[in-house]
Image (tube, grey):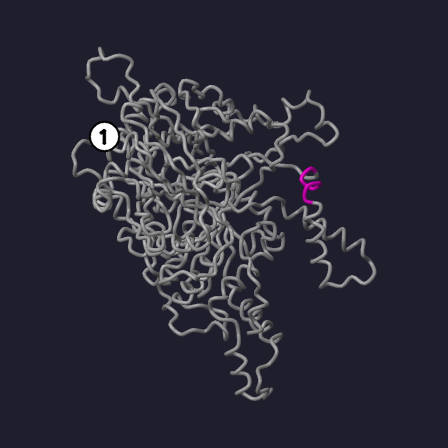
Amino acid sequence: MDPVKFVPFSSTVDSPFWVEYCHLKLEDIQLSEDAISMQAQVQPISSSNVARLQCLGGGSNSLTHSVRKLTPTAVQRSSVDKMIFQGNLVGFNTLETFSKVDKNKLLKEHFLKGFLSSEEANDEQILKSLTSFILLTFPDLKQHKVLYWFGIPALMSKTKLQAKRLPSFSSEEQLVLEQAFHSFRREQESNQLPTFFVFSNQDPSDIVIHPLSKDSFSKLSKDHDGSAEQLVFGFVDSTTVTTDTTQQVVPPMGWPLRNLLAYLSIHLNLGGSTISILSFRPNRLHRLVDETIPSVNSSSNNHIQLQMAVPNKEDYSFEQNNTSDNNNPYDKYKVVGWELNARGKPGPRWVNLKPLLDKNHLAIQAA
Amino acid sequence: MSSLLGSLRSAREWAMPTLKKSAFLEQGVLTPEEFVQAGDELVYKCPTWTWEAGDESKRKSYLPADKQYLVTRQVPCQNRVSAMESDMLMEQAEGGDGDDDDDWLVSTIIQRTEKALNLEDEFDMLDEDGEVIEKPTPDTAGGENDKSEAPTTTDADGDGDDDEYADMDAFEDDNILEDDAAAVTPAQQQADKDDEDHTIKVRTYDLSITYDKYYQTPRVWMIGRNTQDQPLTGEEMMEDVISDYANKTVTMESHPHVSGPHASIHPCQHGKVMKAIVRNLMKNTPPPAETTEGDVDGEEAAMNNGPSVEMYLFIFLKFVSSMIPTINYDFTMEVTANTSK
């Protein structure tokens, strides 16, 4: 068993997104500091080493505000080839409130609000919270600058997460897997790519992938007398750090795996058991119109299968003693995930929108 | 100004009937359906390109809702065109004898890649205010003593409006960093050995291709960011356009789908150029089996053997790269190979 490291997301924001946000701030949001729901996308195939959380301009981020009465889901995705992260944008009116706000608390509450929603029917909500983010901003409209900070929450566990790397797939196995994933994409009703999925590994030549949910888990585990031994929990991992071919070392994993484990422990009651994890790292996505993918296979074998022990429920609780009055059910959890700035320190980034927004500048440019 | 032009443009597009009949080979233009078809091929072959839906209110009805325009993001652009152009001129002057117009362009580009690193030092880097960033000269780069002032801008106190943000330490909050041993922090490692960091930070561009209904051709838009990830001004973007086209064929306009001014290549000549390229491609193609040169049938047969509509955007992007040669977007495909089929 080796300790597992996780690669945080790195955020990129399109300039048009900020332009739209500044217009919205002036016209609609004004002085309100309420959270605005928005979306960002993660591409399953990343051109750089790290997975990127992208906020795009052109409304595809669906920066919505209650004034506009737009629902986030009303915006159509361009295709099912992206993973959509739901998030909240919290804009502050002054630099001081931006600096002073308790950011750890914000991130924690943002994550746990979805993750710990107690109603059984809320499985969908919980799963959505696993891939969510929060974006703090201070739009300085006079100077055309925006100070911003992304947090992509992950639930901390007390124990070190450890894993054993399982042997790589043979080319036949890989083909079966990719074919199954292709069918899985084709069957998606929603217009986005689910980050998490689950399948039974009993017959390796016949894999049917299901989106991860309580229902599909209970259905699949029923076939195996309630045990999760034959199940593989997968997630689409756009991390490509070190394509180390040595079999022993566990390469760094994508950030979403942390919350997947928390979900398995707390919501599927798999704490303490050993399960299989698949880090699915596609090279290319095939056209959805094709029914089968071509059997000419890419030589590289990127997908990584791990054997991991799911932390116990207690491992997520940082409660010092039992004397604390249980006023706040969130108190005992720890959530991490504030993005580091360009210098590698925890701090916000800023963007200068003068070239895009300053009327004087634009007038000179147009002349 | 640019928004006024933008509304004029959209009015004209509205009045223009949608092209129904394919006329790619005859006129170098595309129908919206063919644009989607060609875009699908581009997205499939070059995964860095994706379809975007854009703003719902700005949606064009003649294109599918989820395929309004094509985008490729964060395309590196290492050098300014001016450096490349001056290089070419020098080369022309040097190679006095036998200056063969077809050859020098190719040799310069090859030479450019070899010299890429040296050139990085030769011209000035501009910060977001258009001020020269002082770079350490190769001689002094080894000395540690000047590193503190090297990356800072000479303008830090100029107009004073970024004082507030110049020192980002003020906003850093070490309380945030929970003891999270499980996270990989590549940025942190990099910051520690900043001096040995060999990755060169370059300008990046977001390129998009929209369908221009009036000219019935694709149209290219670009918006750039400097080495510090800050948006470029229009003037700075023009530095990455061949000077013959800057502010003439390439102008600042507002994008039909997203907000903010973009640099755009005006599509008025696109159809003609594409037609010429297609004709040249077909001319170079060995004539089909039954060679009946001259008469109408033969010409038609040659037409049928021309590049398929799916190839349009590849040929188009190759042609566009002659105007923005330093922006290294992905259009990797053998255009010539397909002409022989």
Residue pushed farthest right?
A: B97
Please say if A82 is above or below B137.
below
Between A364 and B198, the residue placed more toward the observer is: B198
Q: Position of residue B315 (x, y in %)?
A: 54, 64
Q: Which secondary structure, mark 1?
A: loop
Q: Which residue lies at the image location 35% right of the left edge and 63% below the top edge?
A: A291
Between B260 and A177, the residue placed more toward the observer is: A177
Between B271 and A358, the residue placed more toward the observer is: B271
Q: Position of residue A275 (x, y in %)?
A: 33, 37
Examine the structure image and report whether residue A238 is included in the region drawn in magenta: no
Please say if B24 is above or below A136.
below
**Range of residues picked out in magenta:** B116-121
Q: Which residue lies at the image location 36% right of the left edge and 69% below the top edge?
A: B17
Report the side of A134 relative to B147 (left or right).
left
Report the side of B203 relative to A302 (left or right).
right
Q: In terms of image quadrants, where is residue A195?
A: top left
Residue at image mark 1: A116
10 Å neighbourhood of mark 1: few (<14), some, or many (≥20)?
some
Secondary structure predominantly adopted by residues drawn in magenta? helix
Q: Position of residue B269 (x, y in %)?
A: 53, 64
